[in-house]
Image (cartoon, rainbow, N blue to C red):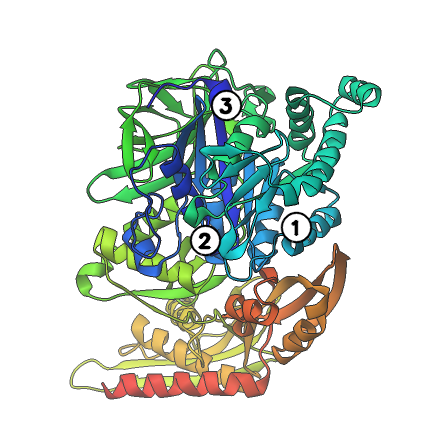
Amino acid sequence: MKEYTTEFLRNIALVSHGGAGKTMLAEAFLHVTGATTRQGKVEDGTTVSDYDEEENRRKISIYSSVIPVEHRDHKINVIDAPGYTDFVGEAISALSVADGAVILVDAVSGVEVGTELAWRYADEFKLPRFFVINKMDRDNADFEKIYNALEEFARLHGKRALKVHLPIGEKHDFKGVVDIIGMKSYIGDGKTIAEIPADLKEAAEQAHFVLVEAAAEGEDELMEKYLENGSLSDEEMVRGLKDVVYAGNFIPVFCAAGGHEIGAIALLNDIVDLMPSPANGPKRMAQGKSGEEELKALDSEPLAAYAWKTTADPFVGRMTYFRVFSGSIQADARVWNQSKGVEERMAGLHFQRGKEAIPAKVVHAGDIASVSKLTATATGDTFCDKNHPLTLEKPKFPAALYRVAITPKTQADAAKISPTLTRLCEEDMTLSWQNDPITHETVLQGMGDQHIDVAIHRAQTKFQVGLNTQEPKIPYREGITRKASAQYRHKKQSGGAGQFGEVHLRIEPFHDGDFEFTDELVGMNLSKSYLPPIEKGIKATMERGAFAGYPMNNVKVIVYDGKEHEVDSKPVAFEIAGREAFKLAVQDAGPVLFEPIMEVRVTVPDANMGDIMSDLNTRRGRVQGTEAEHGNTTVIAQVPMAEMTRYTTQLRSMTGGRGYFTMELHHYDVVPQHVAAPIIEAHKKEMEAKKEE
């Protein structure tokens, strides 16, 4: 691969709903530009960008991969991002290092959920974008219908769609595209250029007129020229269109059939002409020593590079993908990882093309490359010069809301759980894990069942760790609602020394903290030296639970009397007596279970709002209010965590994937009796079974 400097680079993220044909379009780009000798197929598992065995097994993209395409002396880094919602983290990472987004739309299905998601994230990164109506060779393909839907969609978001391509034929007769800018036809993959077919002449001229008007809006000078001459040259048109596309006001619309490579070269031409180079891409800021600094994509500037993806492979080791936002990196250079405060050596510097690694001597400003075997770097870290510290902000990822409890398959797997989960989460910003302090379970959180499934499979194949999953327990807490008192005598006489201790205590709800232990001992019945063992016994019971196996808090204990025996009394006797007296008192103190109540914000299209509200009611939810925007409504409700365990999947099916939600802990509240009874009963049975063992 030749060396490309900043102005000859384009970084483009291919994003869309799952199944719109991103991976095959990337294949077409590689084949028509001569980088591959034949076009791979998703179903055969032979595409360049889906090279992971898990992707081949599922026939979908799971990871973003970088596909550099060389065309007209430019290098276009095409980042093929997954379209399935569970892997949205990969798409966000891809968009965070791109300078433009190419949003694919299926010529039959049109605007889908994933189209809206891709648009929303492209908005967050302020990226100029193209629409490509792909799969124009499908049986029911309909260019006009889908174009009108895109025009409407763009208008809803305050932008304008522009036809830059017209299809020559459609369905089985889709032969090529008419390029409206140059007013010529590209037949097949685009290597043959022809005149515009007669039946499309009028439509092409009309579209050309609209394009010229849009281009004239780009610069005052062009507007004057246009008003004077009534037209613009091709160069002037491209110049004006660049301005309005970079600014994001206009969205050019193209058509293609990636599987048959039709429209591929025409599209590559326009990516080179109308998408910004890193020097003209969206502004990037970094946190410097004395505040924010704007990064410039120049080799001569101080280094700022962002690690946007990490993969671990038992054979190659760790691969770090990064994008240079300013400055440049030479092979073997030492760079400073500002996030970790360590120096890293760029020993194996490469440009990746799928899994193929092409050695690189230098990575210029704006380029995307990879490096192997770094010791400390994880996804989200910034490389810079040690003397000029810069930190790039990580993109915001949606919160992981799908939880599973993880257990090891074998004893050997148990020791490897923590390091394996940590490595998986270092690679994927939408995965997280923790040990739940209340349920003592290891909990893994992700975007949905497929996402978790892939992570578990990856632990098995990449790290040889077998993991089982089950639904996580809810972190209930025990509590009491009124005062009560009890006493207990522990007496054990066995040959020789016996054990004796008697404790009288009172308990009451305590709202100034988790636990308070005091005494009101008078006289000589019980010496204060036995208070610590009594407290120890009660604390241990509170941690393990007094009636349902969940920790108890907000209790005050007052020991007011007791008895001791000068020979048989020992600390352990009072520990037991304290524990049992406490349990007896709890039974009389109106014991209740408390459950975590989540504040949930569910955003859905207006049409689904009624269904969502009534569904939240069946989940014991209390709707607090709604907010409306852009044809969507956000319902705000307080819902018990126990009712939300599989909500991710259920919300998707209720809204056809268009709904999304966030939730965080709001408070703890009493569990209604009918819900609490079976939980307490199950705990009793479990304890009895343990006794019999």
Quadrant where the N terminus sits is top left
Between 260 and 409, the one lying in front of the other is 260
Q: Which mark is residue 286?
A: none
Tell me the residue that label 1 is attached to. Answer: 147
Tell me the residue that label 2 is attached to. Answer: 87
Residue at horizontal 58 percent and vertical 46 percent from the top: 167
How far across and down, in percent of the image, does residue 113 sit?
58, 58
Instruction: Looking at the image, tell me whether mark 2 or mark 3 is earlier in sequence order.
Output: 2
Quadrant where the C terminus sits is bottom left
Tag 3 and tag 1, C-beta contact below 8 Å:
no
Residue at horizontal 78 percent and vertical 17 percent from the top: 221
Please, what is the three-letter code of the amino acid marked with disc 1?
Tyr
Image height of 308 relative to 470, above or below:
above
**Distance from Cα at disc 2 to Cα at disc 3:** 29 Å
Q: Is residue 306 left or right of residue 668?
A: left
Image height of 249 relative to 228, above or below:
below
Question: Which of labels 3 and 1 is toward the front?
Answer: 1
Please, what is the three-letter code of the amino acid marked with disc 3?
Leu
How far across and down, in percent of the image, does residue 306 sit?
45, 30
Q: Residues within 10 Å of mark 2 (few under 14, many from 20)?
A: many
Determine the secondary structure under disc 2.
helix
Q: Residues within 10 Å of mark 3 (few under 14, many from 20)?
A: many
How far across and down, in percent of the image, does residue 172 sit?
49, 56
How far across and down, in percent of the image, does residue 509 sit?
59, 73
Residue 425 visible somewhere in the drawing: yes
Question: Which of labels 2 and 3 is toward the front?
Answer: 2
Tag 2 and tag 3, C-beta contact below 8 Å:
no
Q: Is residue 636 left or right of residue 22?
A: right
Q: Which mark is residue 390?
A: 3
Image height of 117 relative to 376, above or below:
below
Determine the secondary structure under disc 3.
loop
